[in-house]
Amino acid sequence: MPLRTNASQLVEMAVIGYINQPTFRAPGYIADNNGISRMLPGMHGVVYNARVGDPAFGWAADHVEPGASLVNPDAAADNALHYLNCMGNKAIVTSGLAKGAVGVVTGEHQRILVDFEPDAAELLCVGDGVQIQAVGRGLEFGDYPQILLKKCSPALIDSIPIEAVDSRKIRVPVAMELPIRIMGSGAELNPEYVDQDLMSGDRTLMAELGIDRMRLGDLVAINHADHRYGRGYRKNAVTIALCIHGDSVMTGHGPGILTLMTCAEPCIEWTIDPGANIANYLNIREIV
């Protein structure tokens, strides 16, 4: 049975974004961990062949964003698109060849990321409007006020098999645990906005820890990570997060991890479940 929340008290609002074209900063090269200049695709636009459930590592790309990438050209409206959006929100295409197609919000990077079925994705065009039924801002657990929820829609929280351990603790399935020492770029951003990259430059360490098997859409646990109002180290704090974009060649970067829930005390336990991925939980696609 899902944990009790205040979902009935939340306001559900329409926000709109537009599919944007991939962007490059001139001259287009990125220096990798070995100082070699690389030119790779990855961010923004519509990605046809990477979806939640696919590997986060191994692409010939940098920060690959699965699905369709949305932006609003008005700065204040774009802030609302970011801050009001939560994972699992419903998205509807409002214009173009794919008008009427329904997708689901699966990530927040520099843009809002939405998954669509392949047949609909093939019809998406740059500039198409996508309206999102944004709900989740202000979501709380009724019996665990010490655990803060971030970027979670009620649909997402209800879909994850979270267990009540006792009056102070819950237990969440995750695909893997990340050691806080590898958390890098994005620590300077607040946890209500965008993600934090793990530092994947040490490939031997990634293989030893099994992190190179991470998938887009995986739930992960970060022990000693306090993401309540910033992102930093606090002994015994726990954060549960979501892998929202792929690996990076840039020093200090790697797959992106979006905060979902956090507690300054050891109030969140976790169990390892390879199937702990939003592709399964939100019925996007079945993965093993």
Image (tube, rainbow, N blue to C red):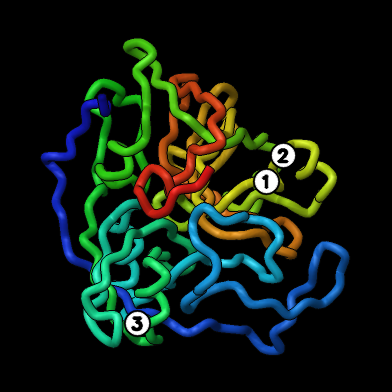
- In the picture, measured across the screen, residue 137 lies left or right of residue 11, that is right
Please provide percent x and percent y for residue 41: 64, 77
Going 42% across and 65% down the picture, which residue do you hit? 113
| Secondary structure category for the residue under label 3 | loop
Marks 2 and 1 in Cβ contact (< 8 Å): yes
Which quadrant, please, contains the N terminus? top left
The amino acid pointed to by label 3 is Pro
Location of mark 3 (residue): 73
Residue 142 or 237: which is nearer the viewer?
A: 142
Please tell me which of labels 3 and 1 falls first in the chain.
3
Image point (23%, 58%), residue name = 134
State the residue in front, 12 or 53: 53
Spatial distance from mark 2 to mark 3, Cα to Cα? Answer: 40 Å
Percent position of residue 192, x then y: 39, 51
Note whether 172 is above or below 276 in the view shown. Answer: above
Label 2 or label 3, whichever comes before in sequence order: 3
